[in-house]
Image (cartoon, rainbow, N blue to C red):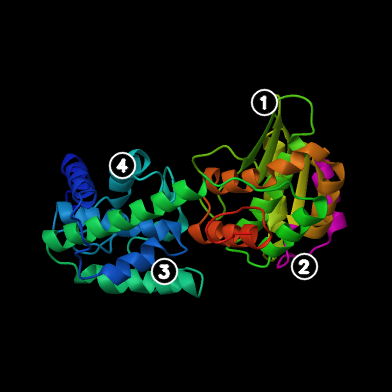
Protein backbone atom coordinates (compact mmCIF):
# COMPACT_ATOMS: atom_id res chain seq x y z
CA UNK A 1 0.00 0.00 0.00
CA UNK A 2 1.33 3.42 -0.94
CA UNK A 3 1.86 5.71 2.03
CA UNK A 4 0.01 8.99 2.32
CA UNK A 5 2.57 11.76 2.02
CA UNK A 6 2.98 14.38 4.75
CA UNK A 7 5.32 17.13 3.59
CA UNK A 8 7.66 17.96 6.48
CA UNK A 9 8.30 21.55 5.42
CA UNK A 10 4.57 22.21 5.22
CA UNK A 11 4.07 20.50 8.58
CA UNK A 12 6.65 22.77 10.20
CA UNK A 13 4.94 25.78 8.63
CA UNK A 14 1.67 24.64 10.19
CA UNK A 15 3.30 24.28 13.59
CA UNK A 16 4.75 27.78 13.40
CA UNK A 17 1.45 29.17 12.14
CA UNK A 18 -0.40 27.52 15.02
CA UNK A 19 2.16 28.81 17.52
CA UNK A 20 1.82 32.37 16.22
CA UNK A 21 -1.96 32.13 16.40
CA UNK A 22 -1.94 30.77 19.95
CA UNK A 23 0.51 33.38 21.25
CA UNK A 24 -1.51 36.28 19.86
CA UNK A 25 -3.41 38.47 22.33
CA UNK A 26 -6.85 37.49 21.04
CA UNK A 27 -6.52 33.69 21.03
CA UNK A 28 -9.43 31.67 22.38
CA UNK A 29 -9.83 27.88 22.37
CA UNK A 30 -11.61 26.93 19.16
CA UNK A 31 -11.74 23.17 18.61
CA UNK A 32 -14.88 21.07 19.01
CA UNK A 33 -12.72 18.68 21.03
CA UNK A 34 -11.34 21.03 23.70
CA UNK A 35 -12.19 18.69 26.57
CA UNK A 36 -10.64 15.64 24.91
CA UNK A 37 -7.47 17.50 23.96
CA UNK A 38 -7.09 18.94 27.45
CA UNK A 39 -7.60 15.52 29.01
CA UNK A 40 -4.75 14.04 26.96
CA UNK A 41 -2.42 17.02 27.40
CA UNK A 42 -2.85 17.06 31.18
CA UNK A 43 -3.02 13.29 31.41
CA UNK A 44 -0.51 10.90 32.89
CA UNK A 45 0.80 9.32 29.69
CA UNK A 46 3.61 11.20 27.95
CA UNK A 47 3.66 9.10 24.78
CA UNK A 48 -0.03 9.68 24.10
CA UNK A 49 0.59 13.44 24.11
CA UNK A 50 3.06 13.03 21.25
CA UNK A 51 0.73 10.62 19.45
CA UNK A 52 -2.19 13.05 19.59
CA UNK A 53 -0.32 16.21 18.63
CA UNK A 54 1.51 14.37 15.86
CA UNK A 55 -1.79 13.05 14.47
CA UNK A 56 -3.34 16.52 14.54
CA UNK A 57 -0.28 17.95 12.80
CA UNK A 58 -0.37 15.28 10.09
CA UNK A 59 -4.10 15.76 9.49
CA UNK A 60 -3.69 19.54 9.35
CA UNK A 61 -1.00 19.07 6.71
CA UNK A 62 -2.73 16.42 4.61
CA UNK A 63 -6.44 15.68 5.23
CA UNK A 64 -6.07 12.24 3.59
CA UNK A 65 -4.07 11.06 6.60
CA UNK A 66 -5.63 8.50 8.93
CA UNK A 67 -5.12 9.99 12.39
CA UNK A 68 -5.17 6.56 14.03
CA UNK A 69 -2.01 5.37 12.26
CA UNK A 70 1.21 5.10 14.26
CA UNK A 71 3.57 3.28 11.92
CA UNK A 72 4.03 3.19 8.15
CA UNK A 73 3.39 -0.58 8.26
CA UNK A 74 -0.26 0.07 9.09
CA UNK A 75 -2.65 -1.38 6.50
CA UNK A 76 -5.36 1.19 7.23
CA UNK A 77 -6.27 3.59 4.40
CA UNK A 78 -4.43 6.86 4.96
CA UNK A 79 -1.38 5.25 6.59
CA UNK A 80 1.63 7.57 6.79
CA UNK A 81 5.08 7.69 8.37
CA UNK A 82 4.00 9.08 11.73
CA UNK A 83 7.26 8.19 13.46
CA UNK A 84 9.45 10.19 11.07
CA UNK A 85 7.11 13.19 11.19
CA UNK A 86 7.23 13.19 14.97
CA UNK A 87 10.99 12.73 15.34
CA UNK A 88 12.01 15.06 12.52
CA UNK A 89 9.44 17.85 12.91
CA UNK A 90 7.46 17.76 16.15
CA UNK A 91 10.30 16.88 18.53
CA UNK A 92 12.63 19.73 17.41
CA UNK A 93 9.69 22.16 17.51
CA UNK A 94 8.81 21.05 21.04
CA UNK A 95 12.40 21.54 22.12
CA UNK A 96 12.65 25.02 20.56
CA UNK A 97 9.20 26.46 21.31
CA UNK A 98 7.42 24.40 23.97
CA UNK A 99 10.13 23.86 26.59
CA UNK A 100 9.64 20.08 26.54
CA UNK A 101 5.98 20.38 27.56
CA UNK A 102 5.03 17.12 25.85
CA UNK A 103 7.66 15.21 27.80
CA UNK A 104 11.03 16.23 26.36
CA UNK A 105 11.60 12.89 24.63
CA UNK A 106 14.01 12.66 21.70
CA UNK A 107 12.33 9.63 20.14
CA UNK A 108 8.85 9.16 21.65
CA UNK A 109 7.68 6.77 18.92
CA UNK A 110 10.21 4.22 20.20
CA UNK A 111 8.12 3.89 23.35
CA UNK A 112 5.90 0.80 23.43
CA UNK A 113 2.47 2.54 23.11
CA UNK A 114 3.58 4.03 19.77
CA UNK A 115 5.05 0.82 18.32
CA UNK A 116 1.71 -0.64 17.27
CA UNK A 117 0.68 -0.14 13.61
CA UNK A 118 -2.25 2.04 14.68
CA UNK A 119 -4.24 3.15 17.69
CA UNK A 120 -6.69 0.48 18.81
CA UNK A 121 -8.37 -0.46 22.07
CA UNK A 122 -6.85 -3.91 21.47
CA UNK A 123 -3.35 -2.50 21.98
CA UNK A 124 -1.62 -3.66 25.13
CA UNK A 125 -1.59 -0.88 27.74
CA UNK A 126 -2.00 -0.80 31.49
CA UNK A 127 -5.55 -0.81 32.76
CA UNK A 128 -7.04 2.29 34.32
CA UNK A 129 -5.90 5.76 33.24
CA UNK A 130 -3.71 4.55 30.35
CA UNK A 131 -6.49 2.51 28.80
CA UNK A 132 -8.95 5.38 29.30
CA UNK A 133 -6.66 7.75 27.37
CA UNK A 134 -6.15 5.19 24.61
CA UNK A 135 -9.92 4.76 24.28
CA UNK A 136 -10.37 8.52 24.19
CA UNK A 137 -7.88 8.89 21.33
CA UNK A 138 -9.50 6.05 19.41
CA UNK A 139 -12.89 7.74 19.77
CA UNK A 140 -12.27 11.41 18.97
CA UNK A 141 -9.37 11.43 16.49
CA UNK A 142 -11.42 9.75 13.70
CA UNK A 143 -14.05 12.46 14.14
CA UNK A 144 -11.60 15.11 12.90
CA UNK A 145 -12.18 15.17 9.15
CA UNK A 146 -11.09 18.46 7.59
CA UNK A 147 -7.77 20.29 7.62
CA UNK A 148 -9.36 23.23 9.42
CA UNK A 149 -10.75 21.00 12.17
CA UNK A 150 -7.32 19.43 12.59
CA UNK A 151 -5.58 22.81 12.62
CA UNK A 152 -7.98 24.20 15.23
CA UNK A 153 -7.35 21.12 17.39
CA UNK A 154 -3.59 21.49 16.89
CA UNK A 155 -3.79 25.10 18.05
CA UNK A 156 -5.65 24.11 21.20
CA UNK A 157 -3.09 21.38 21.91
CA UNK A 158 -0.25 23.90 21.59
CA UNK A 159 -2.14 26.29 23.85
CA UNK A 160 -2.32 23.64 26.59
CA UNK A 161 1.34 22.74 26.01
CA UNK A 162 2.32 26.37 26.61
CA UNK A 163 0.23 26.37 29.79
CA UNK A 164 2.17 23.32 30.99
CA UNK A 165 5.45 25.01 30.06
CA UNK A 166 4.50 28.16 31.95
CA UNK A 167 3.57 26.13 35.02
CA UNK A 168 6.93 24.36 34.94
CA UNK A 169 8.85 27.63 34.66
CA UNK A 170 7.04 29.02 37.69
CA UNK A 171 7.64 25.87 39.70
CA UNK A 172 11.35 25.77 38.98
CA UNK A 173 11.66 29.29 40.30
CA UNK A 174 10.68 28.08 43.78
CA UNK A 175 13.35 27.77 46.43
CA UNK A 176 13.39 25.91 49.74
CA UNK A 177 12.50 28.05 52.73
CA UNK A 178 14.36 26.05 55.35
CA UNK A 179 17.07 23.46 55.83
CA UNK A 180 15.31 20.21 56.71
CA UNK A 181 16.53 17.89 59.43
CA UNK A 182 17.40 14.28 58.64
CA UNK A 183 14.12 13.14 60.14
CA UNK A 184 12.15 15.71 58.10
CA UNK A 185 13.78 14.45 54.91
CA UNK A 186 12.77 10.92 55.88
CA UNK A 187 9.18 12.10 56.48
CA UNK A 188 9.00 13.83 53.07
CA UNK A 189 10.31 10.71 51.33
CA UNK A 190 7.76 8.50 53.10
CA UNK A 191 4.98 10.91 52.08
CA UNK A 192 6.13 11.02 48.45
CA UNK A 193 6.19 7.23 48.24
CA UNK A 194 2.53 6.96 49.23
CA UNK A 195 1.97 7.46 45.50
CA UNK A 196 3.97 5.61 42.84
CA UNK A 197 3.15 7.19 39.46
CA UNK A 198 4.65 4.25 37.64
CA UNK A 199 7.70 4.11 39.90
CA UNK A 200 8.61 7.76 39.38
CA UNK A 201 8.47 8.82 43.04
CA UNK A 202 10.91 6.05 44.02
CA UNK A 203 13.36 7.02 41.29
CA UNK A 204 12.92 10.66 42.33
CA UNK A 205 13.65 10.07 46.00
CA UNK A 206 16.50 7.61 45.45
CA UNK A 207 18.03 10.03 42.95
CA UNK A 208 17.81 12.94 45.40
CA UNK A 209 19.40 10.87 48.17
CA UNK A 210 22.22 9.82 45.87
CA UNK A 211 22.85 13.46 44.97
CA UNK A 212 23.15 14.26 48.66
CA UNK A 213 25.60 11.39 49.12
CA UNK A 214 27.58 12.40 46.02
CA UNK A 215 28.09 15.83 47.61
CA UNK A 216 29.99 14.02 50.35
CA UNK A 217 32.39 12.30 47.93
CA UNK A 218 35.65 13.98 47.00
CA UNK A 219 36.11 14.33 43.25
CA UNK A 220 33.91 15.11 40.25
CA UNK A 221 30.62 13.31 40.81
CA UNK A 222 27.53 13.03 38.62
CA UNK A 223 24.18 11.38 39.41
CA UNK A 224 22.00 10.55 36.41
CA UNK A 225 18.32 9.70 36.98
CA UNK A 226 16.81 8.22 33.85
CA UNK A 227 13.30 8.42 32.46
CA UNK A 228 11.01 5.83 34.01
CA UNK A 229 9.05 3.48 31.70
CA UNK A 230 10.47 4.91 28.49
CA UNK A 231 12.65 3.35 25.84
CA UNK A 232 16.38 3.50 26.50
CA UNK A 233 17.29 2.72 22.89
CA UNK A 234 18.81 6.14 22.30
CA UNK A 235 20.59 6.53 25.63
CA UNK A 236 23.56 5.05 27.44
CA UNK A 237 22.08 4.49 30.87
CA UNK A 238 23.11 1.46 32.89
CA UNK A 239 20.24 1.49 35.40
CA UNK A 240 17.54 3.81 36.75
CA UNK A 241 20.14 5.82 38.66
CA UNK A 242 23.78 5.86 37.58
CA UNK A 243 26.48 7.46 39.73
CA UNK A 244 29.76 8.56 38.17
CA UNK A 245 33.02 9.60 39.80
CA UNK A 246 35.54 11.46 37.64
CA UNK A 247 33.57 10.43 34.50
CA UNK A 248 33.73 6.71 35.35
CA UNK A 249 30.72 4.65 36.45
CA UNK A 250 30.91 4.15 40.21
CA UNK A 251 27.74 2.18 40.87
CA UNK A 252 24.21 1.74 39.55
CA UNK A 253 20.82 1.48 41.22
CA UNK A 254 17.58 -0.10 40.04
CA UNK A 255 14.57 1.52 41.73
CA UNK A 256 11.63 -0.90 41.68
CA UNK A 257 8.17 -0.07 42.98
CA UNK A 258 6.38 -3.06 41.48
CA UNK A 259 6.76 -6.82 41.53
CA UNK A 260 9.96 -7.88 39.74
CA UNK A 261 11.42 -11.23 38.75
CA UNK A 262 14.77 -12.98 38.54
CA UNK A 263 14.81 -12.20 34.81
CA UNK A 264 14.51 -8.47 35.59
CA UNK A 265 17.47 -8.66 37.97
CA UNK A 266 19.58 -10.77 35.60
CA UNK A 267 18.96 -8.29 32.77
CA UNK A 268 20.14 -5.43 35.01
CA UNK A 269 23.23 -7.41 36.05
CA UNK A 270 24.19 -8.00 32.42
CA UNK A 271 23.82 -4.31 31.60
CA UNK A 272 25.99 -3.37 34.57
CA UNK A 273 28.67 -5.91 33.64
CA UNK A 274 28.75 -4.73 30.01
CA UNK A 275 29.15 -1.12 31.19
CA UNK A 276 32.07 -2.04 33.44
CA UNK A 277 30.03 -1.34 36.56
CA UNK A 278 30.97 -3.72 39.38
CA UNK A 279 28.30 -2.66 41.94
CA UNK A 280 24.54 -2.81 41.49
CA UNK A 281 21.81 -2.20 44.06
CA UNK A 282 18.10 -3.01 43.83
CA UNK A 283 16.08 -0.60 45.97
CA UNK A 284 12.48 -1.70 46.38
CA UNK A 285 9.58 0.66 47.03
CA UNK A 286 6.41 0.04 49.07
CA UNK A 287 4.76 -1.95 46.27
CA UNK A 288 7.78 -4.02 45.21
CA UNK A 289 9.08 -7.48 45.97
CA UNK A 290 11.12 -10.18 44.23
CA UNK A 291 8.76 -12.89 42.98
CA UNK A 292 9.60 -16.58 42.85
CA UNK A 293 13.34 -16.35 43.33
CA UNK A 294 16.06 -16.39 45.99
CA UNK A 295 18.11 -13.24 46.56
CA UNK A 296 21.08 -15.34 47.71
CA UNK A 297 21.17 -17.39 44.49
CA UNK A 298 20.91 -14.27 42.31
CA UNK A 299 23.67 -12.56 44.30
CA UNK A 300 25.94 -15.59 43.72
CA UNK A 301 25.26 -15.53 39.98
CA UNK A 302 25.98 -11.80 39.88
CA UNK A 303 29.36 -12.40 41.51
CA UNK A 304 30.19 -14.87 38.74
CA UNK A 305 29.63 -11.98 36.28
CA UNK A 306 31.85 -9.66 38.31
CA UNK A 307 29.03 -7.61 39.82
CA UNK A 308 28.50 -7.07 43.55
CA UNK A 309 24.70 -7.10 43.93
CA UNK A 310 22.68 -6.02 46.95
CA UNK A 311 18.99 -5.70 47.76
CA UNK A 312 17.49 -3.10 50.08
CA UNK A 313 14.03 -1.69 50.76
CA UNK A 314 13.42 2.03 50.53
CA UNK A 315 13.24 2.59 54.29
CA UNK A 316 16.59 0.92 54.91
CA UNK A 317 18.13 2.77 51.98
CA UNK A 318 16.85 6.16 53.17
CA UNK A 319 18.17 5.67 56.70
CA UNK A 320 21.54 4.46 55.42
CA UNK A 321 22.09 7.46 53.14
CA UNK A 322 20.92 9.98 55.74
CA UNK A 323 23.38 8.40 58.19
CA UNK A 324 26.29 8.94 55.77
CA UNK A 325 25.81 12.37 54.18
CA UNK A 326 27.54 15.56 55.27
CA UNK A 327 25.29 17.78 57.43
CA UNK A 328 25.64 20.76 55.08
CA UNK A 329 24.14 18.89 52.12
CA UNK A 330 20.60 18.70 53.51
CA UNK A 331 19.86 22.28 52.39
CA UNK A 332 20.02 21.07 48.76
CA UNK A 333 17.36 18.36 49.21
CA UNK A 334 14.42 20.21 47.64
CA UNK A 335 16.50 21.62 44.77
CA UNK A 336 17.66 18.10 43.89
CA UNK A 337 14.07 16.82 43.89
CA UNK A 338 12.96 19.72 41.70
CA UNK A 339 15.85 19.36 39.26
CA UNK A 340 15.34 15.60 38.86
CA UNK A 341 11.71 16.16 37.88
CA UNK A 342 12.94 18.41 35.07
CA UNK A 343 16.03 16.53 33.96
CA UNK A 344 14.41 13.07 34.06
CA UNK A 345 11.24 14.39 32.38
CA UNK A 346 8.90 13.03 35.02
CA UNK A 347 5.14 13.40 34.66
CA UNK A 348 3.27 16.58 35.61
CA UNK A 349 1.31 14.61 38.21
CA UNK A 350 4.59 13.57 39.87
CA UNK A 351 5.67 17.21 39.99
CA UNK A 352 2.33 18.30 41.47
CA UNK A 353 2.57 15.55 44.09
CA UNK A 354 6.07 16.74 44.98
CA UNK A 355 4.88 20.33 45.39
CA UNK A 356 1.92 19.26 47.50
CA UNK A 357 4.13 17.34 49.92
CA UNK A 358 6.81 20.06 49.91
CA UNK A 359 4.17 22.61 50.94
CA UNK A 360 2.64 20.37 53.58
CA UNK A 361 6.07 19.74 55.08
CA UNK A 362 7.01 23.45 54.81
CA UNK A 363 9.96 22.89 52.49
CA UNK A 364 8.74 25.65 50.19
CA UNK A 365 6.66 28.78 50.63
CA UNK A 366 4.38 30.29 48.01
CA UNK A 367 0.79 31.50 47.63
CA UNK A 368 -0.48 28.16 48.91
CA UNK A 369 1.73 28.11 51.99
CA UNK A 370 1.86 31.25 54.09
CA UNK A 371 2.94 31.54 57.69
Give whichever of discs 3 and 4 has the lower sequence position.
4
The residue tagged 2 is 292
Distance between the Cα atoms at labels 1 and 4? 32 Å
Horizontal side of 157 relative to 195 (left or right) equals left
Name the foreground residue: 244 vs 187. 187
Mark 2 vs mark 4, foreground winner is: 4
Distance between the Cα atoms at labels 1 and 3? 41 Å
Q: Are marks 3 and 2 in contact (CB under 8 Å)?
A: no
Q: Position of residue 332 (x, y in %)?
A: 69, 41
Q: Going 23% across and 52% down the picture, which residue do you hit?
A: 22
Question: Around disc 1, counting alpha carbons within 10 Å, would you say few (fewer than 14), some (14 to 19), or many (20 or more)?
Answer: few
The residue tagged 4 is 93
The residue tagged 1 is 247
Mark 1 vs mark 3, foreground winner is: 1
Range of magenta residues: 284-304
Give whichever of discs 1 and 3 has the lower sequence position.
3
Question: Around disc 2, counting alpha carbons within 10 Å, would you say few (fewer than 14), some (14 to 19), or many (20 or more)?
Answer: few
Q: Is residue 366 above or below residue 43?
A: above
Amino acid sequence: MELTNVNRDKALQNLNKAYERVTSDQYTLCSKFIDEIKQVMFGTHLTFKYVMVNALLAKATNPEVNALCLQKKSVLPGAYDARTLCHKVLVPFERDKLNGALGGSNEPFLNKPARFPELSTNNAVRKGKDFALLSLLCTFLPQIVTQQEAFDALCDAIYFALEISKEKEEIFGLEATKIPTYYEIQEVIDALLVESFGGETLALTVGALMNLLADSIEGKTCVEVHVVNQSGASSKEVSDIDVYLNDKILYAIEAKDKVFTQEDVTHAIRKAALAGCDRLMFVSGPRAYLEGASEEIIVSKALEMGVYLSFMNHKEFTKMILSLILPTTTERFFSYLRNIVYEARLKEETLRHLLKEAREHYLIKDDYNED
